[in-house]
Image (spheres, rainbow, N blue to C red):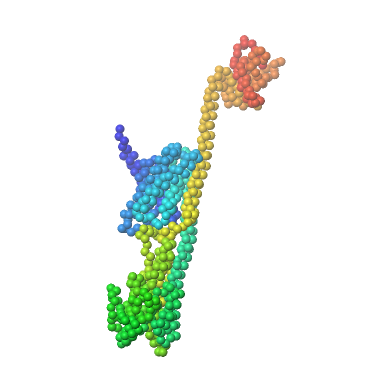
């Protein structure tokens, strides 16, 4: 005989699988729209739960529907978290498929565990079954699926910098919530036996409401915790940016002090310049260098060089650098602004003699400083002292006291790379990415600093905090941007995570267990009552059969003197139906007496004999026919004669006895 299913069976199975997949995707779409706010955590995860309930109710033949629906649902979640460009679509599909396998693994594990540990079909009536299902079967299946899910994301390099335990716990709780709630809903709708699950139809309303409420509650708590974390993030960034503002203010203070120093002096010598600047630098160690850059006209260039060499700078020359960074003599131009005095000299010797006017960015800043008559900052430049680092020059114009004409510049050198890196290091230790951009410079040249992210630091767009603050420096606007990494959010305490996720899962499990226990207890009581009633009915029928089969007429009389039972022989003997006889006095069956024996006896008081003679009753049937009956037995219970059973048999006229 062939084991292959008929075409009709295959078609039904395919239809069932497609229907199941459509239900999973539809529920996911609706839930994502209603329960998951923009930027919120995805705790609504019903795929596995729907599959679990379907397999428990309908059997494992619909497993392809679980895989298809769960894979599509997971693809929706992945795309909602971070929209994928076309080039990454294959990776998204592969990841979603593997996560669908995780949901299928969860559903199949729970199905086979339930078959092994619980009564089949699943009824969940007894406390032991409920505890096993909620505390053992579902957690085991969910944990296996979660482990597969984590390995999938790990292989796809999509894990975050959060600890593995926290990621697994989030997935476990989200999947567990959906598994408990959705499996119950499906079982109420499709579970067998129907007479059991149909009587739990109230759960089909209560459990979804509880599930939606718990998911909303988790989202609300998560949003609250997120807002608190964002406030902490803003404070952290504000404190770090304040450090940068202090550094910039110290450079502006040095520029202002040097300007005032030159304004109060007719001629500043090298020693005087050093004596004034060194105490400032001692108090402000972040100022890399301060230089005096006099204006040297083309006609005075040779004399300036000769005087410098006469001061002891034997190799002094006014130079510039090529695009490749090579040092060459400065070309012919009307004006030169060579670095003449510089403090500290150690480490900055290579900058002495460099013509600031030779480099376009410095040239433009000098022009602006001359026109503005106050300190201005340059756009980012490569420092002469450190070619691999970016710097900014704060140029303060100096005028001579005699004529008030422009005579040169005091340059305060700011090593932007080091200063910003110090602030970036403070934020980087807290898993925050930091960058600084000169908004006044062209877009391609404005980046001053950016902390590179680790390639493995996968970011979810909705998990990202961002704070942008503008800082003014030397008439230019610097834009600072701090962006959280997933590691920053992962630094939340375990108690915060428990409040956001774990407590809600426990709450739903307790609610579901209570619903199953309450309804199961009622169903068990009802089943016991039904079973006992059937047993009593069976016993009653058997007893009635025995009574009716008795060869004597049997009457049962209550303590109040009413007939409560008569067997078939008694009914035939007296000619009454059972309905006519029940509730009547048994004396109705006695023939009327006259004369000395006119006093009627009470049947209830009769006994088998009167002295040594059998007791005889003169009775009559419904149609008036009289006959004599012998009392064969009269029994009363031991508790005051609550019930008397009298056995009567017809006797011939020749039998001797005591006539009553």
Dividing the picture into quarters, in which one does residue 157 lie? bottom left
Residue extending furthest toward the right? 596
Furthest residue toward top: 654
Count how many numbered circles sit on residues in the image.
Answer: 0
Picture quarter with the N terminus: top left
Q: Position of residue 95 (x, y in %)?
A: 35, 52
Residue 448 visible in rendering: yes
Most foreground residue, 164 or 486? 164
Q: Is residue 323 left or right of residue 588?
A: left
User: From the viewer's perspective, is 383 left or right of 642?
Assistant: left
Question: Image quadrant for the C terminus?
Answer: top right
For this rendering, which residue is in front, 22 or 163? 163
Q: Residue at x 35, y 84 (%)?
A: 311
Q: Position of residue 601 (x, y in %)?
A: 67, 19
Q: Nearer the viewer, residue 411 or 214?
A: 411
Q: Residue at x 51, y 42 (%)?
A: 517
Nearer-the-camera pick, 363 or 555: 363
Residue 389 in the image, given as x and y percentages of width and height: 35, 71
Position above or below: 354 against 586: below
When the figure is inspected, residue 542 is found, relative to residue 485, above or below; the finding is above
Residue 37 is situated, as x and y percent measured from the top left of the image, at 44, 57
């Amino acid at each position: 005989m062939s084991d292959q299913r008929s075409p009709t069976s295959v078609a039904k199975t395919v239809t069932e699988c497609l229907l199941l997949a459509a239900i999973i995707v539809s529920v996911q779409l609706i839930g994502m729209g209603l329960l998951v706010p923009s930027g919120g955590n995805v705790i609504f995860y019903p795929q596995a739960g729907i599959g679990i309930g379907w397999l428990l109710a309908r059997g494992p033949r619909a497993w392809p529907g679980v895989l298809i629906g769960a894979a599509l649902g997971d693809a929706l979640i992945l795309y909602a978290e971070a929209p994928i460009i076309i080039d990454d679509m294959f990776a998204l599909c592969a990841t979603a498929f593997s996560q669908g396998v995780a949901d299928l693994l969860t559903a199949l594990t729970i199905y086979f565990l339930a078959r092994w540990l619980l009564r089949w079909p699943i009824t969940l009536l007894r406390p032991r079954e409920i505890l096993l299902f909620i505390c053992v079967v579902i957690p085991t299946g969910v944990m296996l699926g979660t482990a597969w899910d984590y390995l999938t994301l790990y292989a796809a390099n999509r894990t975050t910098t959060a600890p593995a335990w926290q990621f697994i716990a989030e997935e476990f709780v989200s999947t567990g919530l959906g598994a408990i709630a959705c499996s119950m809903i499906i079982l109420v709708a499709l579970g067998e036996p129907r007479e059991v699950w149909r009587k739990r139809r109230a759960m089909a309303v209560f459990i979804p409401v509880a599930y939606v409420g718990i998911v909303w509650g988790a989202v609300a708590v998560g949003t609250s915790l997120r807002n608190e974390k964002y406030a902490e993030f803003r404070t952290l960034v504000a404190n770090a940016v304040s450090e940068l503002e202090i550094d910039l203010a110290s450079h502006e203070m040095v520029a202002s002090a040097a300007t005032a120093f030159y304004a109060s002096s007719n001629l500043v010598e090298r020693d005087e310049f050093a004596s004034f600047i060194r105490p400032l630098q001692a108090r402000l160690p972040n100022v890399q260098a301060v230089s005096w850059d006099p204006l040297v006209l083309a006609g005075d260039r040779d004399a300036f060089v000769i005087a410098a060499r006469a001061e002891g700078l034997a190799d002094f020359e006014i130079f510039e650098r090529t695009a490749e960074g090579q040092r060459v003599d400065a070309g012919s131009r009307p004006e030169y602004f060579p670095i003449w005095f510089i403090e500290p000299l150690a480490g900055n010797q290579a900058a002495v003699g460099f013509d600031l006017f030779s480099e376009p960015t410095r040239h433009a800043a000098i022009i602006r400083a001359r026109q503005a008559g106050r300190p201005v900052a340059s756009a980012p430049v490569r420092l002469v002292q450190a070619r691999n680092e970016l710097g900014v020059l704060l140029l303060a114009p100096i005028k001579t006291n005699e004529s008030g004409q422009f005579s040169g510049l005091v340059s305060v050198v700011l090593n932007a790379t080091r200063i910003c890196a110090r602030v970036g290091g403070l934020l980087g230790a807290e898993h925050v990415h930091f960058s600084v951009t000169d908004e006044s410079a062209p877009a391609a040249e404005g980046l001053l600093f950016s902390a590179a992210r680790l390639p493995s630091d996968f970011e979810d767009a909705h998990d990202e905090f961002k704070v942008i603050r503008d800082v003014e420096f030397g008439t230019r606007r610097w834009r600072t941007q701090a962006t959280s990494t997933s590691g920053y959010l992962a630094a939340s305490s375990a108690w915060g995570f428990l409040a956001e996720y774990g407590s809600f899962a426990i709450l739903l499990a307790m609610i579901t267990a209570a619903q199953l226990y309450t309804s199961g207890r009622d169903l068990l009581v009802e089943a016991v009552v039904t079973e006992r009633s059937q047993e009593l009915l069976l016993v009653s029928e058997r007893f009635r059969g025995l009574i009716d089969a008795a060869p004597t007429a049997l009457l049962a009389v209550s303590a109040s003197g009413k007939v409560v039972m008569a067997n078939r022989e008694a009914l035939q003997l007296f000619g009454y139906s059972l309905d006519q006889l029940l509730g009547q006095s048994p004396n109705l069956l006695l023939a009327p007496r006259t004369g000395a024996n006119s006093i009627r006896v009470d049947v209830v008081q009769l006994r088998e004999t009167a002295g040594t003679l059998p007791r005889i009753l003169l009775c009559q049937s419904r149609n008036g026919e009289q006959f004599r009956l012998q009392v064969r037995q009269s029994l009363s219970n031991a508790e005051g004669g609550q019930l008397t059973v009298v056995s009567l048999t017809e006797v011939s006229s020749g039998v001797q006895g005591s006539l009553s």
